[in-house]
Amino acid sequence: MKLFFLTLITLFFIQAYCHAKSKVVNIYSARQEVLMRELIDNFEVKENIKVNIIFSKANQLIKKIEMEGEYTDADILLTVDVARLLSAKKKGLFKTINSSILKNQIPSIYRDKDNQWYGMSLRARIFIYHKDRVADKELKGYLGLMDSNWKSRLLVRSSNNVYNQSLVSAMIYNYGRETTKDFLSRFTKNFARNPSGGDRDQIRAVVAGEGDIALVNSYYFIKMKKNDTEKKLNKIRVHFPFDEKMKTHINISGAGIIKYSKNTDNAIKFLEFLISDEAQKVYAEKNFEYPIKEGLKISSFLKKYSIQKKDSLDLNLIADNNKEALMMMGKAGWR
């Protein structure tokens, strides 16, 4: 009888240990902690699941997961730009997740066709410009940046940047290869300086008069504008480029569940939480990204920067042209 009770007690502690161990999800995140902390705290309270998170550059995290293989602790890769999600999928790092919540609430063009990655928020590749140095009639679609009137006026970051690579990949689909090659050869002749720095640096350079117009991601400018207590951006305006063939380029932040995940159910819960109305509101009001869910009410401040016409390109197609886009950019002299 004593042996029976000892066995029961042992089983109880084993079950309790396994249960406690299962109440966790491990995230490898290319998104900064300041952008994720409120979402993580809210999730932990709501689901009683502990979130462990490692922050690093996306490429470093992808390489880390590859090296760790089946011994990785990672359950989720959370990153920005669809190209990085497509890269992780190509390396075989994700597993298929068939969540009706994710599939029903995320438009198909912003999630993987094989249900291996899902977009969580949207951002746009836009123009910001100085209102005293740029006339409204000069503002067109992306192809307009190759016009000679922009010579020595254009600011942009390096071609190594994945945001620019995804944009050019989308342009190949929308405009065709020859038009995109012509665009790049003329576009690079309009640089005000050699590409350097990040998107915030391009915005600051426009303010400083180093150039008149810059190509940047929407949330960088919107966040800077929100925090502009010194009114340094008072003369900076936003233009959402579009023409008859290509509307404003849309990209995502997103996530996939690692194929070696030991906490898959918890990982699914976390992704489903990220597209809840509660989490989407945090994305919009704290991170200044656009909700991926349609019809969600956004703040009056963000509404001022609503995208007029979104490009409808399926982001699954970006991978097809990404390598070619980078080669074309290099040949055109975009370093």
Image (tube, rainbow, N blue to C red):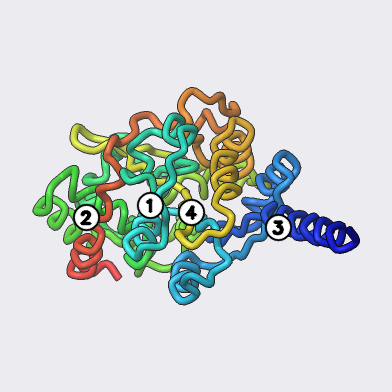
Which image quadrant is residue 59 in?
bottom left
Give the residue type at disc 3. Cys
The residue depicted at 37 percent of the width and 40 percent of the height is: 110
The residue nearer to you, when weighing 189 against 134, is 189
Whole-Å distance between the Cαs marked 1 and 3? 35 Å
Read off the residue under disc 2: 320
- Residue at (25, 59) in percent of width and height: 322
The residue labelled by disc 3 is 18
**Decide: marks 3, 4 in contact (CB < 8 A)?**
no
Q: Which residue lies under the disc numbered 1? A: 82
Residue 19 position within the rendered picture, expressed as x and y whole percent measured from the top left: 72, 53
**Residue 194 locus on image (x, y percent):** 35, 69
Residue in the picture at 46% in, 76% down: 67
Instruction: State which quarter of the image contains the C terminus.
Output: bottom left
Report if residue 254 is visible in the image.
yes
Q: Amino acid at mark 2?
A: Asp
